[in-house]
Image (cartoon, rainbow, N blue to C red):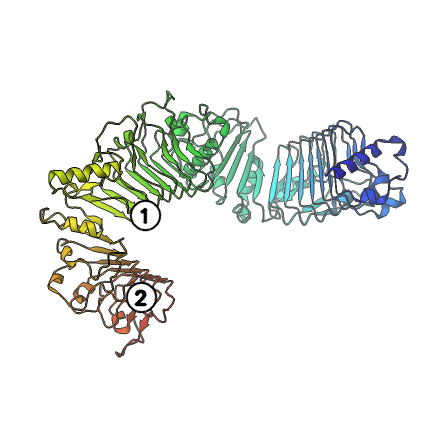
């Protein structure tokens, strides 16, 4: 690294030696040829950066950056009388000139093109206030590799390509820039043309055309406007030929700047629709301060279906971006807008983001996310109005969110109208609501939040940090869904849990470190009641450390609970008996409290007549107590049998228990170790009148299951009523049925990870599937055919009139 710096110092000092300015270099060609990149700044006091005699020796130079120098007047000083310069082909690819107020020539002389810069790919010129022209016309005609041309803030620039003295008047010149993809011209009051004479400018690959605040430059004309055509001819002498014909401009343009005049032209030419449909970025730059505008051109926005980003600058008279009253012209305009930039709008009073336009909701969320990501405002009052924050009703954050704290304390009071929050797939997230109890503005805030969803937040440690005294109220919460938050130990504080009177759904899954749902507060007295008067759905799944709802003696009251699903939580006791004697009851209550294992509910206080339950073998024994009301489970429609004890093998399902479930419609059997057949071939008295209303059967993770048994005679009346059948991870099952069975109501069949499955149905059975809508088979390695042909004829043509999906 230090060698490059040393070499640069040597060449800089060499060029400073005025006595050798016109002498052959005393340093070897190899030394100069080693330079690929050079930079000169304010320390450079020369008027000429590269004198003519040095050009042949810098033939390998690829990048040149000159900036911040008041002395520089010429970049390349080319003497056409020098023989050695006539064979120069420069390797220069990138030229950057910035803040050179006295620069008059980039290439001095070279009118005959004796030096070639045809490798140039990028030219950026900014704030060179004395520059009148950039290229000679011969040089401009040989820029076949130029990809980017950017010229801004050059106050005296009149043209980009200079007219040569010997050029015959009226001769039309062709400028071809076959690789140019980016053209930016901005803030140049005297620029009137690309070339001061008749010419064609061809840029077939142009993708970005941003020309703004160059009032004398005509950007577009139309071949279909005869009056305009006549005007062009007249304007050639005043050096104002437009740069492009709208009919010939590149169809690849995606980024475009337009003024009011250009918008009017684009409105009139119907052929431009193909170009406009590709525009993703639009810069509206209104240059006439005498023409006030009271609204944006929403009718024109309809021509831009893929507009992603909109920048509005210097629109005089505009007081509101999005008016409160939505008119027909506003419909479907800006539907995909995701970025909005407002610059130098002196009379703007209101953006209007609070108005209920469809596209605005997404744009507002982007603005909020950017604001929350600004670390320097984390502990300051928001710079955005209360009304802006108050307009949010729904927010969603995903993997793009890299903050540890989602909503800091100082923003909480301003999001009081937020009703739904969804946060997912972020490894950075550690805290959702950071509540600072010392914040005065936070105290007494009542949130409208109704639904919160947290999914796959691997490092989340707190949903509500602090708030032990309940200074912030979330009593409007109706639904809480937490899934895949492996670092979360507890969910609610006790004070918060006691004020969730409207909570209807609580779903917590795959939180491996979760120990309790509600955390204990230090000064809490012994024994408390936690009541959820509206809770109807509680699901706790796959949490190996979860041992209790609250780590202390408590009563959990959920009078409206109708669906209670708890599975793969081995340390959690769901039910306890209420019929033990006093000494045993004391033993059951006190011991688990010390071990943080108090069961969720007394068996007789579970919601009257639940609709959905997950039961283990232990819970089935408790539920079978004759002292319980006989109609306790009479409304149960969904039952999940989850047997998680591998040491306790079962050879059959608890059919005697099924008698208590007259309305059972959906049965899921999973992890039942030892079970080889669902429905045994021999019908026993215990099988009478059970499962008569069954419509949905799920068989999951039954490693020893060999046969379902749907083909048995006593089961076939049930088979006819089945509407859904789903098998997953049943590695020994070879077929759904082995002989003819009628499934006249079966609509959905799903089979996955059944390694020995060779076929699903026989041909005769398949013909009964007249209502089948969905068939899905995945990862069944032994599958040979869906249908096994049996002895009966007529399998050549089977009609599935309702089948919609095969996977």
Residue sitting nearer the eye, 569 or 174: 569
Left or right of 171? Residue 148 is left
Please identify the quarter of the rendering in which residue 32 is found. Answer: top right
The quarter of the picture where the N terminus appears is top right
Looking at the rendered structure, the secondary structure element under dot 1 is loop
Badge 1: residue crowd in 10 Å (few <14, some 14–19, many ≥20): some
Picture residue at 26% right of the left edge, 44% below the top: 572
In the rendered image, the residue lying farthest to the top is 440
- Choose between 137 and 710: the one closer to the eye: 710
The residue identified by callout 1 is 542
**Quadrant where the C terminus is found in the figure:** bottom left
> Residue 806, percent across and down?
35, 63
Indicate whether 691 appears above or below 372. Answer: below
Compared with 389, 607 (above or below) is below
Q: Is residue 187 left or right of residue 714?
A: right
Residue drawn at x 46%, y 23% as measured from the top left: 380
Q: Residues within 10 Å of mark 2 (few under 14, many from 20)?
A: some
Task: Say if residue 331 shows up in the picture.
Answer: yes
The picture places residue 569, in percent across and down from the top left corner, at 29, 46
Q: Secondary structure at mark 2?
A: loop
Q: CA distance from mark 2 to mark 1?
A: 25 Å
* Residue 192 seen in the figure: no
Residue plotted at (25% across, 73% down): 764
Name the residue rendered at 19%, 44% in the picture: 575
Q: Is residue 224 left or right of residue 603?
A: right
- In screen coordinates, is 555 left or right of 194? left
Q: Which mark is residue 732?
A: 2
Report x, y in % for residue 35: 77, 42
Of marks 2 and 1, which one's residue comes earlier in the chain? 1
Nearer to the camera, 710 or 199: 710
């Amino acid at each position: 690294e230090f060698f490059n710096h040393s070499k640069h110092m040597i060449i800089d000092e060499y060029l400073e030696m005025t006595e050798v300015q016109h002498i052959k270099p005393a340093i070897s060609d190899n030394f100069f040829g080693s330079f690929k990149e050079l930079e000169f700044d304010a320390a450079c006091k020369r008027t000429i950066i590269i004198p003519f005699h040095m050009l042949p020796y810098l033939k390998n130079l690829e990048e040149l950056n000159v900036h911040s120098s008041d002395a520089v007047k010429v970049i390349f000083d080319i003497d056409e009388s020098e023989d050695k310069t006539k064979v120069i082909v420069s390797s220069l690819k990138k030229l950057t000139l910035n803040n050179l107020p006295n620069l008059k020539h980039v290439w001095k002389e070279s009118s005959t093109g004796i030096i070639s810069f045809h490798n140039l790919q990028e030219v950026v010129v900014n704030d060179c206030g004395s520059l009148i022209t950039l290229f000679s016309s011969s040089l401009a005609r040989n820029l076949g590799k130029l990809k980017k041309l950017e010229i801004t803030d050059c106050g005296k620039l009149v043209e980009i390509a200079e007219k040569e003295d010997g050029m015959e008047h009226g001769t039309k010149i062709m400028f071809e820039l076959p690789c140019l993809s980016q053209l930016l011209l901005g803030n140049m009051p005297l620029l009137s043309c690309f070339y001061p004479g008749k010419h064609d400018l061809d840029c077939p690959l142009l993708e970005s055309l941003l020309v703004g605040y160059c009032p004398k430059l005509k950007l577009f004309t139309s071949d279909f406007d005869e009056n305009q055509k006549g005007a062009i001819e007249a304007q050639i002498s005043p050096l104002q030929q437009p740069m492009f014909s709208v009919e010939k401009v590149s169809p690849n343009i995606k980024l475009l700047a337009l003024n009011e005049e250009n918008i009017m032209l684009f409105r009139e030419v119907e052929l431009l629709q193909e170009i406009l449909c590709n525009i993703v970025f639009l810069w509206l730059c209104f240059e006439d301060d005498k023409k006030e505008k009271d609204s944006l051109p929403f009718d024109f926005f309809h021509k831009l279906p893929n507009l992603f980003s909109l920048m509005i600058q210097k629109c005089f008279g505009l007081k509101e971006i999005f008016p409160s009253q939505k008119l027909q012209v506003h419909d479907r305009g800006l539907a995909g807008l995701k970025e909005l930039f407002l610059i130098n709008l002196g009379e703007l009073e209101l953006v209007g983001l609070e108005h209920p336009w469809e596209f605005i909701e997404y744009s507002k969320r982007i603005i909020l996310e950017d604001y929350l990501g600004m670390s320097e405002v984390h502990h300051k009052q928001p710079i955005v109005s209360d009304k802006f924050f108050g307009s949010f009703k729904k927010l969603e954050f995903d993997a793009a969110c890299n903050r540890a704290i989602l909503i800091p304390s100082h923003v909480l009071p301003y999001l009081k109208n937020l009703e739904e929050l969804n946060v997912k797939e972020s490894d950075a997230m550690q805290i959702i609501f950071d509540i600072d109890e010392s914040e005065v503005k936070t105290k007494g805030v009542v949130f409208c939040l109704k639904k919160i969803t947290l999914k796959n937040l691997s490092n989340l440690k707190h949903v509500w940090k602090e708030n032990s005294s309940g200074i912030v109220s979330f009593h409007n919460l109706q639904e809480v869904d937490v899934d895949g938050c492996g670092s979360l130990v507890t969910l609610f504080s006790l004070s918060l849990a006691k004020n969730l009177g409207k909570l209807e759904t609580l779903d917590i899954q795959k939180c491996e470190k979760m120990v309790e749902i509600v955390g204990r507060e230090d000064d809490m007295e012994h024994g408390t009641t936690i009541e959820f008067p509206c809770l109807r759905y509680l699901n706790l799944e796959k949490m190996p450390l979860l041992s209790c709802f609250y780590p202390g003696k408590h009563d959990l009251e959920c009078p409206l609970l109708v669906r209670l699903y708890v599975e793969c939580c081995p340390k959690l006791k769901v039910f306890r008996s209420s019929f033990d004697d006093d000494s045993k009851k004391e033993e059951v209550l006190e011991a688990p409290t010390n071990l943080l294992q108090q069961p969720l509910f007394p068996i007789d206080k579970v919601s009257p007549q639940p609709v959905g339950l997950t039961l283990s073998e232990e819970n089935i024994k408790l539920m079978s107590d004759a002292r319980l009301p006989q109609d306790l489970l009479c409304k149960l429609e969904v039952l999940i049998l989850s047997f998680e004890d591998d040491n306790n093998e079962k050879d059959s399902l608890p059919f005697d228990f099924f008698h208590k479930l007259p309305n059972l419609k959906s049965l899921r059997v999973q992890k039942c170790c030892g079970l080889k057949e669902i429905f045994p071939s021999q019908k026993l008295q215990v099988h009478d009148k059970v499962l008569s209303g069954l419509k949905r059967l799920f068989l999951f993770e039954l490693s020893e299951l060999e046969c379902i048994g749907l083909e048995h005679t006593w089961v076939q009346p049930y088979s006819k009523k089945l509407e859904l059948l789903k098998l997953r991870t049943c590695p020994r099952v070879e077929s759904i049925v082995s002989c003819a069975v009628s499934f006249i109501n079966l609509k959905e069949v799903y089979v996955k990870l059944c390694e020995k499955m060779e076929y699903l149905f026989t041909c005769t059975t398949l013909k009964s599937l007249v209502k089948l809508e969905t068939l899905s088979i995945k990862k069944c390695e032994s599958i040979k055919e869906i249908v096994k042909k049996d002895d009966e004829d007529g399998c050549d043509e089977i009609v599935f009139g309702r089948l919609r999906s095969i996977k």
